[in-house]
Amino acid sequence: RDLGMAHWGFSIWTGDQSARLTTCSSRFGGRPHRIGEGETRVVCHIAKLGLAPGRYVIRAGLYDADTSWPIARVGWEDAAIPFQVLPKGTEKDNRHLVDGDVMDVEVDWQ
């Protein structure tokens, strides 16, 4: 069944789902894709996410390109997709874990 043109997106939340950290959608800077029968692949490259070590979840969705009505969603009405950012064992990562930080911002001190 051809579902027509669609945008997709995802949002990243803290592991306890108390705070949304970001939302990314192909509607903003991307283009819709035709969702036909069979398998369709859409790729999103994230150059630098900047999350501190810890547990997070993703909620994702596929939305009609014209109406923004959801075609399929994961993590909204059902369980979100968990993932973990592992520490590299550095002092900085250890501090992020102890302090409960969610962001790892790269800075250049002058």
Image (spheres, helix red, strand yellow):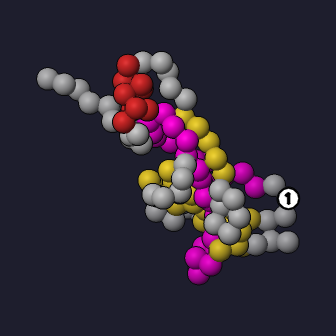
Segment colored magenta = 40-69
The residue lying toward the viewer, choosing from 99 and 85, is 99
Q: Main secondary structure of the magenta part?
A: loop
At x 42%, y 18%, the residue is 90
**Residue 6 seen anywhere in this rendered image of the structure:** no
The C terminus - image quarter: top left
Residue 39 picture quarter: bottom right
- Location of mark 1 (residue): 38
Check disc 1: other Cα within 10 Å, few if <14, some if 14-19, many if 20+: few
Amino acid type of the residue that numbered disc 1 sits on in the rendered structure: Gly
Q: Is residue 65 magenta?
A: yes
Q: Residue farthest to the bottom?
A: 67
Residue 63 appears left or right of 26: right
The N terminus - image quarter: bottom right
At x 53%, y 57%, the residue is 17
Residue 23 appears left or right of 104: right
Residue 46 percent location from the top left of the image: 50, 42
Residue 64 appears left or right of 91: right
